[in-house]
Amino acid sequence: MSASRKGEAAGLREVTRLIGHYRGAAPGSMLICVAGLHGNEPAGIIALQRVFDWLDATRPAFRGECIGLVGSVSAAARGVRFIDEDINRLWFADRIDAIRAGTLDGQEAKEQEELLEHILDALDRSAEPASLLDLHTTSGSAAPFAIIGDSPRNRALAEHIPVPVVLGLVGEIAGTLTDYAHTMGAATLAFEGGRHDDPGSVDRHEAAVLAALGAAGNLIEGDSPQVEAARLTLTRASTAIPRFLDVRYRHEIDEADGFSMRPGFASFQAVEAGQLLARDRHGDIVAPVGGRVLLPLYQSLGTDGFFIVQPV
Ligand SMILES: [Zn+2]
């Protein structure tokens, strides 16, 4: 591994599929944490390395099991979002059948096959309903937030992770890992920790994992000051933003559009209807409705220019 490899300066160790695995003496539920599904988002991987280091070193009272997985090892090693295809848009039943039958080629098919195997094994092993936390970062600045499909089990998980929760994105973006794992019976939540290169994103991901260990009952909040501290970190990082928001508009783009977001927008920034947000080859792009802008695109790869959300 070369010393100049991307991410190393930020504390990223060698990237392997299984970041860590921890099992407590008492029975309990399974928490599956995935990071680096997009390879240019190392913060979640570093955070999971830290959490497993802490578990191994301190061996706290723990029920059940937790595993940490890298979504795309090859993309993470190169520090790129993906090699050929966005692996977080590929979790469709027919594709998964093809992968399990070994009839699909390509780097992402290989990555997806290995990741799928770990996840299905973990779900199989879990005597109680499992949870899956998927860690991401964004190209623009953002307070931490969660994305869930609206179901009682996902909401119950989100209750323990005190950040704004965006509903309705799951319906806009098809083929996500969280969507698939939910159909396999897990409570799922995607956590957006902040900007890709913000060191604080690592801290917020670490806090989200600890809060999820509390939510899953692996660590009991009263027994673990770390869980309480994590919840406080998350609460403080996202004050003054409504707890539940819904997507009101999605600006979909393709490469030919030449989409360019106006500089300076951060997720959850308030915008008014008619406000200039971006430009493309057709001209100005204004907000069609008022609300708060979400996930403004400041990188070249992606299919969504921005979203507008409003409080539920
Ligand atoms: Zn991502």
Image (cartoon, grey):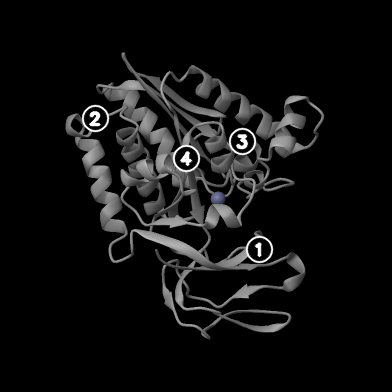
In the picture, the quarter occupied by the N terminus is top right
Residue under label 4: 188
Marks 1 and 2 in Cβ contact (< 8 Å): no
How many C-alpha atoms fall within 10 Å of the one at disc 2: few (<14), some, or many (≥20)?
some
Secondary-structure class at tag 1: loop
Instruction: Look at the picture and state if 173 lies above or below 271.
Output: above
How many C-alpha atoms fall within 10 Å of the one at disc 4: few (<14), some, or many (≥20)?
many
Residue under label 3: 73
In the picture, the quarter occupied by the C terminus is bottom left
Please report whichever mark, 4 or 3, sits nearer to the chain's N-terminal start.
Answer: 3
Marks 4 and 1 in Cβ contact (< 8 Å): no
Q: Is mark 1 within 8 Å of ligand 1?
A: no
How many C-alpha atoms fall within 10 Å of the one at disc 3: few (<14), some, or many (≥20)?
many
Residue under label 2: 220
Please report whichever mark, 4 or 1, sits nearer to the chain's N-terminal start.
Answer: 4
Front-most of 235 and 12? 235
Residue under label 1: 300
Residue for point 39% across, 55% down? 144
Q: Distance between the residues labelled 4 and 1?
A: 28 Å
Residue flagged by tag 3: what amino acid is it? Val
Residue for point 78% across, 37% down? 106
